[in-house]
Amino acid sequence: MNQRDVIFPAGRQAIYEQNRYSPAIRSNGFLFVSGQVGSREDGSPEPNLEAQIRLAFDNLNAILSAAGCTFDDVVDVTAFIVNPESVMETAMRVLPDYWGAAPHPTLTGVGVTWLSGFQFEIKVIAKLPMAHANAPV
């Protein structure tokens, strides 16, 4: 098996090591980002819903930046939402602040019953810019 090319955002490596997963893997010109939640620096959920969603996007953007990407490089989004009938309106209000201009990435929304104390999680696949696409697999 090839060595995984793991991307860590600044200052959060301990959370990923504690939970035993990689925040993102660079492979074959793409960046595969694990689901990001609105966790504070200590890993606990941000209690305010809108702030939690914004923090999830901020945490996502930190990973994208560490890989030399921006949200403009994102091609596919999956959002997991607890109680979508009550959370979706807030999520859709926050989304344009991070989403960027059209054309937008694909989006799949999944209603779930549990996210370990969080209400919103976002995972993405991004196309790496050419300068970062040929990094080791």
Image (spheres, rainbow, N blue to C red):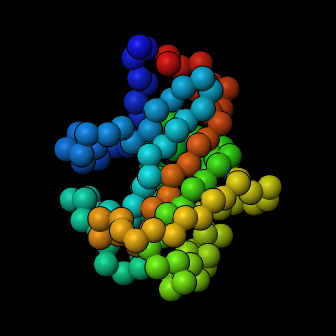
The relative height of residue 96 versus residue 90 in the rendered view (above or below) is above
Q: Quadrant of residue 4?
A: top left
Of residues 109 and 62, which is closer to you in this image? 109
Measured as percent of width and height from the top left, residue 73 is found at: 66, 44
* Quadrant of the drawing holding the N terminus: top left
128, above or below 107, in the image: above
The residue under the point 56% across, 78% down is 88
Residue 131: x and y in percent read: 63, 25
Relative horizontal placement of residue 12, taking residue 91 as reference (left or right) = left
**Horizontal placement of 104 versus 59: left or right?**
right
Residue at 36% of width from left, 68% of height from top?
114
Q: Measuring 70% from the left and 54% from the top, which residue is drawn there?
A: 106
Residue extending farthest to the bottom is: 86
In the image: residue 117, left or right of residue 60 = left
Residue at position x 54%, y 26% in the image: 27
The x, y position of residue 66, in whole percent, is 46, 39
Is 20 positioned to the left or the right of 65 in the image?
left
Q: Is residue 65 visible?
A: no
- Look at the picture and state if 82 lies above or below 122: below
